[in-house]
Amino acid sequence: MPAASDAHELLRRFLDDGDESAFRELVEHFTPLVYGVARRKLDDVQLIEEVCQNVFVVLAGKALTVSRYRYPGAWIHRAATLETLKAARNLATRKRHLAMIENELKTRLPEDADWKSVRVLLDEALLKLPERDRAILIAHYFEERSFPAIAAQLGLNADAAQKRGARAIAKLARLLNRKGIAISAAALAAGLAPELAPAAPVGLAMKSASAALAATSSVGATTTLSASLIAMTTSHITTITTFALAALIPLGFRLTTASFKRVNEPAALRSPEVASTSRGPTTQVSQTSDFDPEWFRSRLQRLVDGDDRNDPDQADARRLQRHLFGLGEEDIAKAIAVLGEIEDPDFRLGLLVTAAFARFAELNPTAAVDRAANLTLERWGYYAINGAWQTWAFSDWDSAIRWLAGTKTEFDHVALVWGVLDQEAKLDGRTALRWAEELAEDFPRHSESLYERALSAWTLAQPEAAIAWMDENLRDPVRRDQRLGNALESLGTHAPAQALDQVDLIENPERRREVSYNLYWQWALIQPDESATYLAEAFAHDRTWDTHFLWSAGEALARNAPERALEIARMARVPQERDALYGGILSGAAFSDYTTILEAADAISAETARTNNCLQGFLTDWWKRDPTAAVAWVDAMPEGDKKSWVQHIMPR
């Protein structure tokens, strides 16, 4: 792992040389930290990935500022925590989420700590520590750096850094105690390292880096547009139409300079006239007569001039969105004109433009999309076309597709329809797949990506239905196993037992092993008792397991529930399964847990003992700290290969 000085060097290469590989390396390094922050607070896989992407988009935009920090990791943790909290506030299920947290906090936890409750509040507690304290904890527990190395970076001596770290752990424990979490500083220190650096999903770092670099390359490394785009991906506008739009706008949607026709600079937006050559039906709505352009302009200016960055959830923005959806066609044209007159270099009004064109499309869809497609890229084309076309697509899919296939504008058609496929798949996956097949006829070059998009969205929203459909309809064995694995992992986020029961649907042994590992690893770390019970019941019914899977299960359980891990291992009747479980336990148990380690060490075969590096590390450490106890344990072992190997590690 790169040290803080290496992080500074990577930032310098990115800033001075435009070296994207340096930025990708930085993202790869810090992705587990950001992923862990988001996962502890959120239970939506898609939203967690979105938070990760957003944090690194902001990092790319503020790279110069971050490079001035003594330790960039502390800044990244703070950004991840704030972004996660923002996403949690915007979730439609916020009340249920808060109720769950409150219920967990009503019960005092045992001294060894229920990490399910700890992780909910961990990052907010970390954020309350002084920045230097937080930097020490992240450097030591996330990056596994020694205190002398941390001291050199922060300008302290080694003893002072270690003492400061111990005091920081004690402060963190007290902060959690005040919230009803009964955990000691020792228990917190023992569990902090695996909690701060969980295994992030494969490909997440690459996806986050690509999204961040895409955002910065289109508008410059210091632009504030990225902050506006972040808000667009996590906000939900209160009306039905704009709720769909907020979820539809893809973070990585990039348009080239030729994406929209240029028509007389921004005048196309400022002009109050509406195109009269509508090719589709127009909804007749009575025009409102109380729209006041000056009042609207003053409220927009207040948003643009405010101290806070674009936040579509602020009260004024919500009121203006609701106001726009009450306007008739003539007045919505006036509102669009006023929006075009406001100088808004930071694009704080982007969602209001989206809402305005969504309303325009409700009233006159073809006029709305024609006008949106003729806007210049530098102003509002991105927001307008999403609002207009996607609203039309939900109300009249066939007409919207005919317009899309026949228009001569050169924007990315596929990026537009992705959002519609995402939303339809959440409601009816089969319809979304049918739409993807229809689109493939007009855009054959993108047929595979459209199909994958619809199937992936259906998998995330309704994994059970998607799994049943894939099992019945997919014929290509490689793609079938890949997609089934993705669907089972999505199902595993809320029903891990159900997902594990279906892994046998995957025919390829390597893919089945990979999915089983991912499913159980995440489940065991988050809910060790429930996952242990599942494994115990399976053993009771003589279910056989892959030894690689059992090794990972033992390791994951040993981190949070070592007693349950030993209980499960004692149930294994097959020697290979028993060795795999105990071997994993040795890899996951803390060195301070002598009881767990010694039982596992006694139980495993000589071959497994020799190949378990964690056991060798423990024995070496034990020999140095307590040679009398170590010798007594060796003497009590039966004669054989294992005793000979142990004596080689711990000679008299």
Image (tube, helix red, strand yellow):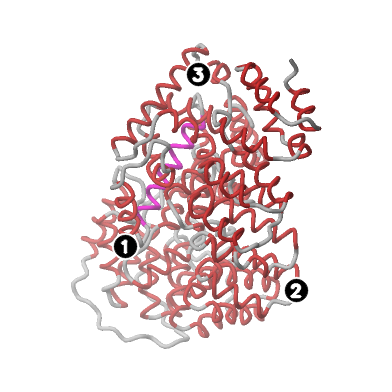
Tag 2 near tag 1, CB within 8 Å: no
Is 518 drawn above or below residue 15 in the view shown?
Answer: below
| Quadrant housing the N terminus | top right
How far apart marks 1 and 3 lie (CA) works out to 52 Å
Residue density around tag 1, few if under 14, some if 14–19, many if 20 or more, within 10 Å: some
Q: Which mark, by number, is residue 154?
A: 3
> Disc 2 marks which residue?
476
How far apart marks 2 and 1 lie (CA) works out to 54 Å
Task: Depth check: give the residue in front, 568 or 503.
Answer: 568
Identified by mark 1, the residue type is Val
Q: Position of residue 500 (x, y in %)?
A: 59, 62
Judged by depth in the image, the label closer to the viewer, 1 or 3, is: 3
Identified by mark 2, the residue type is Asp
> Disc 1 marks which residue?
338
Comes first in the chain, label 1 or label 3? 3
Is 266 drawn above or below residue 278 in the view shown?
Answer: above
Residue drawn at (21%, 60%) of the image: 295
Judged by depth in the image, the label closer to the viewer, 2 or 3, is: 2
Q: What stretch is highlighted in magenta?
A: 72-90
